[in-house]
Amino acid sequence: MSIPPFVLALRERVGHDMLWLPGATAVVLCEDGPRPRVLLVRRADTGEWTPVTGIVDPGEDPAVAAVREVREEADVVAVAERLAQVSVIGPVVYDNGDRSQYLDLTFRCRWVSGDPFPADGENTDARWWDLDDLPAMSPSMTSRLQAALPARGEAEFVA
């Protein structure tokens, strides 16, 4: 997985110690057909299907980060419509011993253009899924997706 330069710089100072990082999840919905579809990517590191996720860069608006990650990872243009969920993810221990915990901000996003494909090497597949025919996902990813569905209007705070 691609590690942002600012995280690499922090790791030079703190080694494998816990980092608290802001993350963004983009649940991109395409409603141009008879049934809404959601964009999912298959992660290269775990093989799991997920919405697009990423780290918010210093000074970057989290909604902008979500949209940027969609463009970078799936070559799809999207617009963030609303904050859907706020949650804490982790702690996560990576294979190299790095430890992180994430404040995740999940956004419901609307597809604007583009046909998904794994654009940056972080994923092995990217495609649209019918909401009634989703692949297996972790409870955390399922929760993020459910929070962003059209029937929900307000942000959900996960304790």
Image (cartoon, rainbow, N blue to C red):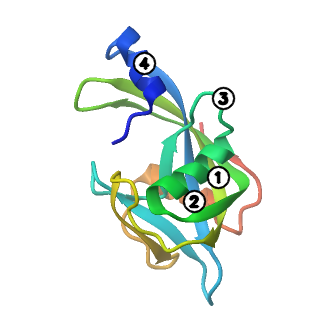
Say what secondary structure mark 3 lies in.
loop
Instruction: Report the Cα–Cα distance between label 3 and label 1.
Output: 18 Å
Residue shown at 53% from the left, 56% from the top = 70
Dot 2 and dot 4 residues touching (CB under 8 Å): no
Question: Which residue of the protein is positioned furthest toward the left in this rendering?
Answer: 95
Dot 4 and dot 3 residues touching (CB under 8 Å): no
Residue at label 1?
Answer: 107
Instruction: Report the Cα–Cα distance between label 2 and label 1.
Output: 6 Å
Dot 2 and dot 1 residues touching (CB under 8 Å): yes
Amino acid bearing label 1: Phe
Instruction: Report the Cα–Cα distance between label 2 and label 3.
Output: 22 Å
Image quadrant of residue 60? top right
Residue at label 3?
Answer: 59
Residue at label 4?
Answer: 9
Residue shown at 60% from the left, 79% from the top = 36
Q: Earlier in the sequence, mark 2 or mark 1?
A: 2
Residue shown at 41% from the left, 68% from the top = 117
Q: Earlier in the sequence, mark 2 or mark 3?
A: 2
Say what secondary structure mark 2 lies in.
strand
Amino acid bearing label 3: Gly
Q: Earlier in the sequence, mark 3 or mark 1?
A: 3
Residue shown at 60% from the left, 85% from the top = 35
Question: Does residue 130 appear anywhere in the picture?
Answer: yes
Q: Specify few, some or many for label 1: CA neighbours under 10 Å numbering under 14, 14-19, or 20 or more.
A: many
Q: Quadrant of the C terminus?
A: top right
Amino acid bearing label 4: Ala
Residue at label 2?
Answer: 27
